[in-house]
Amino acid sequence: MSATLGIAGAGLAGRLLALAMAERGWDVTLFDQDAPDGTRSTTYAGAGMLAPGCELEKAEAEIARYGLQSLPLWKELLARYGPTVYHGFTGSLVVAHPRDQRELQQLQRKVEQRAAESGVVQSVSASRLAELEPALAGRFRNGLFFPVEAHIDNRAWLDALREALCARPVAWHTSTPVARVAPHRLVTAQGDAHAFDWAVDCRGLGARTDLPALRGVRGELLYLHAPEVTLSRPVRLMHPRYPIYIVPRPDHVYLVGATAIESDDLGPITVRSVLELLSAAYSVHSGFAEARVIETVTHCRPAFPDNKPRLLYGDGLLHVNGLYRHGFLIAPALIQFARQYLETGSIPAAAQPIMEAYPV
Ligand SMILES: Cc1cc2nc3c(=O)[nH]c(=O)nc-3n(C[C@H](O)[C@H](O)[C@H](O)COP(=O)(O)OP(=O)(O)OC[C@H]3O[C@@H](n4cnc5c(N)ncnc54)[C@H](O)[C@@H]3O)c2cc1C
């Protein structure tokens, strides 16, 4: 008989794990409070950048390592489950206005010091910048190029995962809040208890009752339609408070984000954030002046105090959480660790820094 697995939470982590285990013949049941389109998840709100180099500005070295490990896994996942999902493995650029040149140099130094391998970041001249992104010609005197970085349409990817799951024998209880995830057991808010060989908690911030150390870090972003702007890869602008990025989607749609505010407020975007994001976009390319604001997005990233993810394991129980601002970047590697742990009961060596017994 195949092993049974109950997963609470069908965001990025829950969907990837459900697919990975269903592919290996496990009998998988997925629970989520949301509909299958997942519009209430952090995953739906994210920007889908896979930026192991840029993130080294603030993130721990493990994040870059798991991110680099995840890039080839992303290629496999996209080929298998989402060949038509918009994505680009075309690298990303960082630019700075003259007053922020020092920050640009500091970023380059920091990345070079902290990256485990060379070539993660390259300094580029104005002419190379213009070759990479003709729309930036004459606008910046230099920049940084991160050649291995990538981006993916997060919403199309959620859809692709929904289709892949629906095509497999995975039971999916939608609109079903889970009140408790316990060893071998999930209990819904209605009080129904479901028994499994393994219960896995992928509820993101929804797991706070069981993981009180989790906190929300608010992120706001804008969707713009800018027919006068043509960018083919993410462009980050150095900013005194947080790096602001412009991430392309098909048909001249761009995401401009994202704030990072210590708060679990899910309320609408503030005027201050709109002003900061829009003026940053306009300062990168004046064609954004005529852009239409087609959507504003706010959500909170699930984070532990050190901003590192965790796989917390116990008898018949696993929590996959704290993906913070790196969920897309690192999820394939984390799910590989989770799968190896569920299959073998042992902790993969590379996962040791983020795997802990639960409860501690
Ligand atoms: C503005 C913004 C921009 C971002 N940009 C990037 C980026 O460019 N690159 C990157 O790598 N990361 C980015 N992130 C982070 C990334 O989106 C998250 O790390 C990732 O989506 C977290 O995935 P998850 O599956 O852990 O959580 P979620 O996607 O939140 O999934 C949790 C699921 O659990 C369900 N749930 C919650 N509570 C319950 C309950 N009680 N019962 C049943 N179901 C429940 C929810 O409905 C949801 O479907 C960004 C985040 C934000 C907010």
Image (spheres, rainbow, N blue to C red):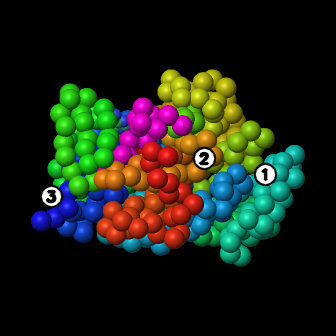
Residue count near mark 1 (Cα–Cα under 10 Å), binned few <14, some 14–19, many ≥20: many
Which circle, 2 or 1, is nearer the viewer?
A: 2
Q: Which sits earlier in the primary sequence, circle 3 or circle 1?
A: 1
Q: Which region shows up in magenta?
A: 199-213
Q: Could you say which disc has been placed on residue 169 in the image?
A: 3
Residue at 66% of width from left, 54% of height from top? 59
Q: Could you say which disc has been placed on residue 9 in the image?
A: none
What's the residue type where badge 2 is placed?
A: Asn
Residue at 41% of width from left, 49% of height from top? 319
Residue count near mark 3 (Cα–Cα under 10 Å), binned few <14, some 14–19, many ≥20: some
Residue wearing tag 2:
307
Q: Which sits earlier in the primary sequence, circle 2 or circle 1?
A: 1
Residue wearing tag 1:
96
- Mark 1 beta carbon near ligand 1 (under 8 Å): no
In front: 172, or 226?
172
Q: Quadrant of the N terminus?
A: bottom left
